Image (cartoon, rainbow, N blue to C red):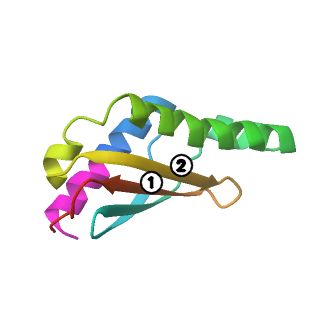
Amino acid sequence: MSKKIHEFNDIIRKLRKDLFGKGPERIHTVFVENLAVSTLYGNITPTEKFIAGTVEGAKMVHEARTIMIQDLYAQATPDGMEELVGAKLLHLFSDIKIEEDMAVSVFMFDKTIEE
């Protein structure tokens, strides 16, 4: 794994730990042209697992894990992310599979990310 990808993953992990109380246990990121595609494993806290035991609870955890993170990135890009990749973050697309405890985030930047 390149140093840049490792540092990118650390930014994601820290932000999610600060926001949700638990960061992903494992992150796999690839840079493709102007995109950073991150697959995040082991995201859900024990409390969220308990809440997700019902259909309504799973829906609530899903919304919190997608809408909250997208809103946060829309308000402000995490410290150091744009400097690290040398490009401005335009959009974040994010989704999570609660049952599998796996999430995918696609970061779209204004220019190609050099590895």
**Up-down: is 52 above or below 106?**
above
Q: Of label 2 and label 1, which has the lower sequence position?
A: 1
Residue at position x 46%, y 30% from top? 19
- Reply yes or no: does residue 36 show up in magenta: no
Q: Position of residue 10 (x, y in %)?
A: 28, 48
Query: Which residues, given as a range, are shown in magenta?
Result: 1-10
**Up-down: is 23 above or below 31?**
above
Dots 2, 1 in contact, CB < 8 A? yes
Residue at position x 41%, y 34% from top? 74
Q: Position of residue 85 (x, y in %)?
A: 18, 54
* Secondary structure mostly taken by the magenta-highlighted segment of the chain: helix
31 and 47: which one is in front? 31
Q: Quadrant of residue 56?
A: top right
Query: Could you tell me the amino acid type at mark 2?
Result: Asn
Callout 2: SS:
loop
Label disc, if present, on residue 25 of the rendered structure: 1
Quick check: 114 left or right of 45? left
Task: For marks 2 and 1, give the CA distance.
Answer: 7 Å
Residue at position x 53%, y 54% from top? 42
**What is the crowding at mark 1: few (fewer than 14 residues within 10 Å), some, or many (at least 20)?**
few
**What is the crowding at mark 2: few (fewer than 14 residues within 10 Å), some, or many (at least 20)?**
many
Quick check: 77 left or right of 64? left
Looking at the image, which residue sits at the far front? Answer: 110
Mark 2 highlights which residue? 43
Query: Could you tell me the amino acid type at mark 1?
Result: Glu
Callout 1: SS:
loop
